[in-house]
Amino acid sequence: MRYEVVITCTLDGRYNRAPIGVHFRGRDVNLHLYQGSHTYEILEREDYFVVNVASPYLIAQSVYDDSGNYSTIEYRGITLPYLSEAYRIYVVKVSKRKFVDLRDGYGDTKLMGIQGRILLERDISSPPLRPYSRADGLIVEMAVLYSRLGVARGKKREEIIRKMREYFEIIEKVGDKRYIQLGERFLEGVNEK
């Protein structure tokens, strides 16, 4: 199963965060990054990153920029950032990279597959126990679609925008103010991507 998390990493003292789908297999973590993202550029060179298990809202919010509340963890002389609001973190060392030329519905691009080994895990805070809201899943789906706008063209781009609007209509009905504002921000950013 693929899990949505936030990856944090650093290059030259600058922190980066990005929502990414990962697979856990025992102590291994597998993920794929598209060329052109900051995370791709950093993990092409750096061997360590942190997997942050976080709230759906924080996952979606992480699409926008690298600002946020960070803490750091030391591992064998390496300082790595993690999200202060994370529930659990995993410090991971890259063990293998595989580069593939990809042609899909979004166009031609390079994909970097990463396999990493979990070196350390730590609970940061307990997730709140509350009923599930459909806004949780939909805001993450809006974020995923928003992140693909930069590479989507033609009918594929129109389909993404249509889905984003459809999801937002539901978020307006079932989400709280923060979710609605983030959904609005995604829709406002459609023309910028």
Image (cartoon, rainbow, N blue to C red):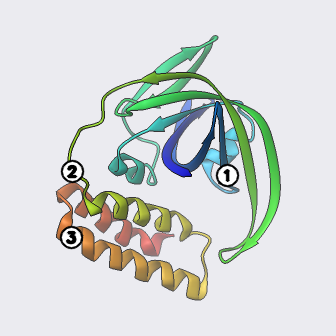
Q: Amino acid at mark 3?
A: Glu
Indicate the amino acid at tag 1: His
Q: What is the distance, in whole Å, between disc 2 and disc 1 at their CAs?
A: 31 Å
Q: Vertical placement of 162 versus 185: above or below? A: below
Residue pointed to by mark 2: 131
Q: Is residue 8 above or below residue 159?
A: above
Q: Check disc 3: other Cα within 10 Å, few if <14, some if 14-19, many if 20+.
A: some
Amino acid marked by disc 2: Pro
| Residue ID for mark 1 | 32
Pointer 3 with pointer 1, Cβ within 8 A: no
Relative image position of residue 34 (x, y in whole percent): 67, 57
The quarter holding residue 106 reads: bottom right
Badge 1 marks a residue whose secondary structure is strand
Numbered disc 2: secondary structure: loop
Spot occupied by residue 73 in the image (x, y as percentages of width and height): 50, 19
Q: Which mark is residue 6?
A: none
| Residue pointed to by mark 3 | 172
Give the residue displayed 48% in from the left and 68% down from the top. Answer: 145
Q: Name the N-terminal-most of marks 3 and 1.
A: 1
Q: Gap in Å between the C-alphas at discs 2 and 3? A: 18 Å
